[in-house]
Amino acid sequence: MTQHRTARPRRTAARLGALALPLALLTACAGTAEPAATAAATDEATAGARTEAATYTPRLVLTYDGGLVVLDATTLETVSTIEEPGFLRVNPAGDGRHVMVSAEGGFHLLDAGTWAEEHGDHDHYWTADPTLTDVTFPAETPGHVVVHGDRTVLFDDGTGEVTVLDPHQLADGPDAAVRTYTTPAAHHGVAVLREDEHLVVTDGTEEERTGVRLLDADDAEVAATDQCPGVHGETVAADEIVTVGCQDGIVVIDGDTVTKVDAPTDYGRIGNQSGSEDSPVVLGDYKSDPDADLERPTRVSLTDTATGEITLVDLPSSYTFRSLARGADGEALVLGTDGQIHVIDPETAELVRSIPVIDDWTEPDEWQQPRPAIHVLDGTAYVTDPATDRVLAVDVETGEVWKETTLDVTPNEITSAAGRHTH
């Protein structure tokens, strides 16, 4: 059953300037807009008729065993259910309209059916029925999708191929690629393209992942390290500083410098990170037991990319790789197995408050199995609760659970389409 609450205005102009909350969607025209080229280029991928909206309409995209569910991010009402077999993964595609769906054959393009068009000094907003388009970016083993600046980077774990896309031309399929690169050996890796056209890319093989390389626009090596065992995960912090996780610390890529920052313990795996481009501090997980089959950590890491220092923060509960997020003001958010969102000040490394959201839960044995996840959009933390098939919307600033809904399916992964260009 969907609960209804009247939308309410935001409290601070600062929040509106960064990413206006769904609670403030009564603004006539947003300050940031999706270029008209994006909408025009992708209209052909949408079969249904479009409807003009008074403002942008953010949507959530969730996976379940058997397909995808698209929700209105403000009302949490179901917009569409799309049946699709197999284990699906979802990531933003970079244009505020599309979502990359990782499945057999590659990265498949979902049109979430929400976008903006520039019109002189203002924008027009449109919605349409979501559709899983025929556009596919082929991959033997589709892996990480990284959106940064005005580029979207795909990594194929099966071949080591890195594909850099112009997100405004996604309907062109593989022709949207503006750059490609293939790592020396295939591995479970990741790549990030900086705005200066320098590519950060992991290095390894199927058996061992050990390094990070920084390449210039011509793919010539600028700097590298081979001191990053178990390399995994990435994020971007303030001043476009990129981090990549290791089993014994983290690699910081700043300008033309690649620096390994050692963990405070001999084994300190920081395999998942969440950054904010407004903060020099990166939130990461932290696992310290190399012999554990399934470690349930109770500490997170905060890496100050400006000083190269790692600080560990104790939490009242464990968490999983889908538990990390950042708030609109850069707050470090961790969804614990105690059902609370733990809010950490990244500057002081203090746990400032905990927000009760769902009941206690236990991490499943297999990483593909559904577990609660957190996703932040426009100052709202959206939390999935597979035990009850619910999705809940939490105001990070006030801690209020301002909306919730119960689905007809069990949610697994979650992402969003903002309905406007956010870069």
Image (spheres, rainbow, N blue to C red):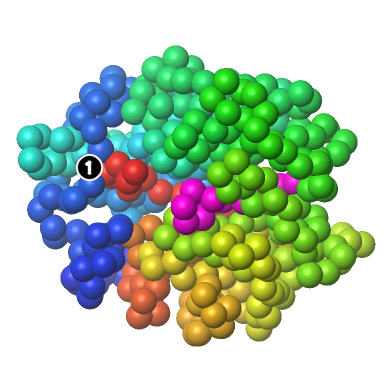
Q: In which quadrant is the C terminus drawn?
A: top left
Is 232 contained in the magenta span?
yes
Of all residues, the one furthest to the top in this rendering is 175
Q: Quadrant of the N terminus?
A: bottom left
Residue highlighted by disc 1: 33
In the rendered image, the residue lying farthest to the left is: 120
Residue drawn at x 67%, y 29% is 221
Residue at 18 percent of width and 70 percent of height = 9
* 104 in relation to 10, above or below: above
Q: Is residue 101 visible?
A: no
Q: Where is residue 415? Give x, y as percent.
A: 46, 49
Tell me residue 418's x, y (percent).
32, 48
Q: State the count of labels.
A: 1
The answer to which of 82 and 270 lies nearer the viewer is 270
* Vertical side of 30 occupied by 396: above or below: below
Q: Where is residue 66 shown, x and y percent of the image?
A: 56, 40
The quarter of the picture where residue 42 lies is top left
Residue in the foreground of this view, choosing between 75 and 3? 75
The span picked out in magenta is 230-244
Judging from the image, what secondary structure is the residue with disc 1 in? loop
Is 262 in front, or is 34? 262
The amino acid at mark 1 is Ala
Query: Relative to residue 74, is residue 63 drawn left or right?
Result: right
Locate residue 280, reporting x and y percent: 51, 62
Could you tell me which residue is drawn at 62 percent across and 30 percent down? 215
Indicate whether residue 14 is drawn in magenta: no
| Mark 1 surroundings: few (<14), some (14-19) or many (≥20) residues within 10 A | many
